[in-house]
Structure formats: C-alpha cells, structure tokens
Image (spheres, rainbow, N blue to C red):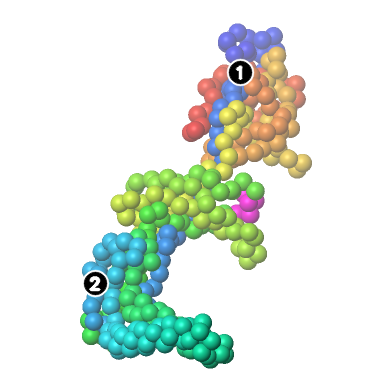
C-alpha cells in the first residue's frame, strides 16, 4: 500500500505484497560525543620546603586555610644572619669612607690609579658579600608562591628544618584541571577550546569546561591520546585526585541523515538499507558515520524524503511489492 493507506495494484489480496513499517527521512542536528574517564588535578600544586637549615620561630598559617600570593607562612631563626648583616653594613660604611678619601687623594694625584682601584674594589667585595647575606635572609621566610589553599602542616614551632623537609602542600584548585585519554581515531577532532562536561562520583551536578592542551603524540601502548581540560571550581567542590566521568563533544552536525540502527543490513562489502519507491522495495548501499545505541548517521546513500523500510527486511528483495505503514522519525538528543 501507499503511505495514505490506499492499496497499490501490487498489494491487492493475493498480490503478495509484504506489509512493512517505514519512515520518511528528515535531517536533524546530531553531536559526535566521546565518553571517557579522567582524574582531577590541581591548577597549581607545590610542596613547601625550606632551602636552608634552621629552627622554626613562627608558623603563620592555619591548616586548610586560604592564603594569598606572597603571604608569609613560616619564619626560620635568622639571628645569626642578622648579626652577620649588621657587621657587613658596618664594614660597608668604613669602605665607603675609605673610598671617598682615596678618590680625593687620587684626584690630587696623591696616590696611583692602582692604589685607588684596590681600595674601590674592597667596597665592591663588601657589597657583594652583603647581597649574599640578604639572599640567605630571604630564605628564612617561606612565602606562598600563588593564591591557593594550604593543606596539613608537617612541622611545629621549634622544629629544626633541613633543606627538603616538607612543611605543607599548597594547591590552587580554581580552575580545576582534568586529565583524560581518548582513542587515537578522534585525535584530529580534539583541539584546544573543545567543550567538555564532567561529573564526579556521588555528585549529580554536571560541570562545564574546555580542553586547553593535547599531548603531541599517541601513547603506543594504549593507542590513546592524553589531553587536559579546565573547569571553573569557585566553591572548591571538585578535589584533586578524584575520579571523573568526562563527556567530550568533538563535532556538531546541523543537518545529518539519521536512521534507526535496526534498518541497517550488514553485507560482505559493507552495509545496505531498503527504501520504498512506487510500492516496491529497492536496496541501497550506504556509508555510516556516528553511531549511538539506537541510531546511525548515514553519510552517503540516503537523502531527505526517502522512504526507509524498517521491518520485514528478511522477506525483501529488489522489486518486491510492499505495503507501507509509516512511523514517525526517531528523536535524537541534540
């Protein structure tokens, strides 16, 4: 029969027409989405360790507190260095006076250039030694390298530290990073700026982010490509180290031909479908694209307004009379 229910000549009783369900193909927007898993990482993370030995005189931070870049976190005893600095400052004052007198004598031709240079270089040496002490003094103050949150404290006031002793860890988690891998076949589609969504276990909320970096090569062991994305995390709900489910939309197609997967017939050379024309079936070779659980994108072989046969496929061959019952087009989530 035809789509309006009127019988075609070949479908009259005894005509052998096969009753089938069919739909008229319409284009619709679809997305090519990858589902993968990843691990959350801090935007910035550092282990706070001293560069010099010494006793802790004051701890200036609370565990788990937010700190700003440059905030003083720990002070190491600097009495000996302060004494050395005072001595150098006194030596510098004497050397400045001596250089001034030598300059006056040299200008009056009272001493040679060589004698003046020797006295002037003494001042330069004292100033260089003073700079070394100043840099050592700076190392007695451990300051926050960026805005972030400090973790647990591993030292106390009075502790004697040596270079490399762990004081605490510090992290910046807004934005948060997520690291994930995708199959190599999608390598060309994933670029910086590609939008992603992520979810963490037990949390129903979906967080939006975007890819900012893609590894330069495919991992030969897993045949996957590693990438990283960032997502805003102003409330600090997303915690580094957590497992995340990641969804990446690698491409959007505005006018795709999408059919129910059940209409596809596999063959040795590829895949085909049957369409109905003037009450008879005709097979068409098709090329497929994006697949979902229930639908398949057809990139070649079908066009809008073709009448696609969905049922009775085993009884069909080219030229077989069919009696059509139309079905609405499948819904595809945008």
Q: Looking at the image, can residue 310 be seen?
A: no
From the top left corner, tell me how far across and down residue 30 is, in percent.
55, 34
Distance (Cα) linking label 2 and label 1: 81 Å
Q: What is the quadrant of residue 289 in the picture?
A: top right
Q: Secondary structure at mark 1?
A: strand
Q: What is the quadrant of residue 299 in the picture?
A: top right
From the top left corner, tell me how far across and down residue 80 is, in percent.
30, 89
Q: Nearer the viewer, residue 132 or 76?
A: 132
Q: Nearer the viewer, residue 159 or 124?
A: 124
x 56%, y 27%: residue: 28
From the top left corner, tell me how far across and down residue 148 is, in percent.
34, 61
The label shown at residue 60 is: 2
| Boundaries of the magenta span | 183-187
In the image, which is nearer the foreground, mark 2 or mark 1? 2
In the rendered view, would you say 174 is above or below 130?
above
Q: Could you tell whether 78 is left or right of 306 in the image?
A: left
Task: Please say whether residue 35 is one of the residues in the magenta stretch.
Answer: no
Q: What is the quadrant of residue 259 in the picture?
A: top right
x 23%, y 69%: residue: 62
Q: Which residue is mark 1?
A: 324
* Total numbered labels placed on residues in the image: 2
Q: Looking at the image, can residue 32 be seen?
A: yes
x 42%, y 62%: residue: 44
Q: Secondary structure at mark 2?
A: loop
x 29%, y 71%: residue: 73
């Amino acid at each position: 029969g035809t789509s309006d229910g009127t019988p075609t000549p070949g479908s009259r009783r005894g005509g052998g027409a096969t009753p089938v369900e069919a739909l008229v193909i319409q284009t619709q927007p679809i997305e090519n989405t990858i589902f993968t898993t990843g691990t959350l990482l801090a935007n910035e993370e550092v282990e706070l360790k001293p560069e010099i030995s010494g006793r802790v005189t004051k701890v200036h931070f609370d565990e788990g507190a937010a700190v700003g870049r440059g905030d003083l976190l720990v002070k190491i005893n600097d009495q000996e260095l302060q004494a050395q600095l005072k001595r150098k400052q006194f030596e510098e004052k004497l050397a400045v006076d001596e250089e001034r007198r030598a300059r006056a004598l040299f200008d009056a031709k009272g001493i040679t250039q060589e004698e003046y240079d020797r006295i002037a270089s003494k001042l330069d040496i004292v100033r260089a030694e003073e700079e070394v002490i100043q840099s050592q003094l700076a190392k007695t103050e451990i300051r926050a390298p960026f805005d972030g949150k400090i973790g647990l404290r591993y030292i106390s006031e009075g502790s004697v530290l040596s270079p490399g002793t762990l004081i605490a860890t510090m992290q910046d988690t807004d934005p948060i990073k997520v690291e994930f891998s995708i199959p190599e076949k999608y390598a060309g589609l994933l670029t910086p700026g590609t939008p992603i969504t992520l979810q963490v276990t037990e949390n129903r909320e979906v967080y939006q982010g975007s890819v900012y970096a893609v590894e330069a090569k495919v991992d030969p062991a897993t045949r996957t490509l590693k990438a990283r994305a960032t997502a805003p995390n102003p409330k600090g709900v997303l915690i580094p180290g957590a497992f995340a489910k990641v969804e990446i939309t690698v491409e959007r197609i505005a006018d795709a031909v999408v059919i129910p997967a059940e209409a596809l017939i596999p063959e040795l050379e590829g895949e085909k479908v049957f369409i109905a024309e003037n009450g008879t079936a005709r097979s068409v070779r098709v090329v497929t694209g994006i697949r979902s659980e229930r639908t398949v994108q057809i990139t070649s072989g079908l066009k809008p307004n073709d009448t696609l046969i969905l049922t009775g496929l085993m009884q069909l061959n080219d030229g077989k009379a069919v009696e059509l019952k139309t079905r609405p087009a499948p819904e595809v989530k945008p």
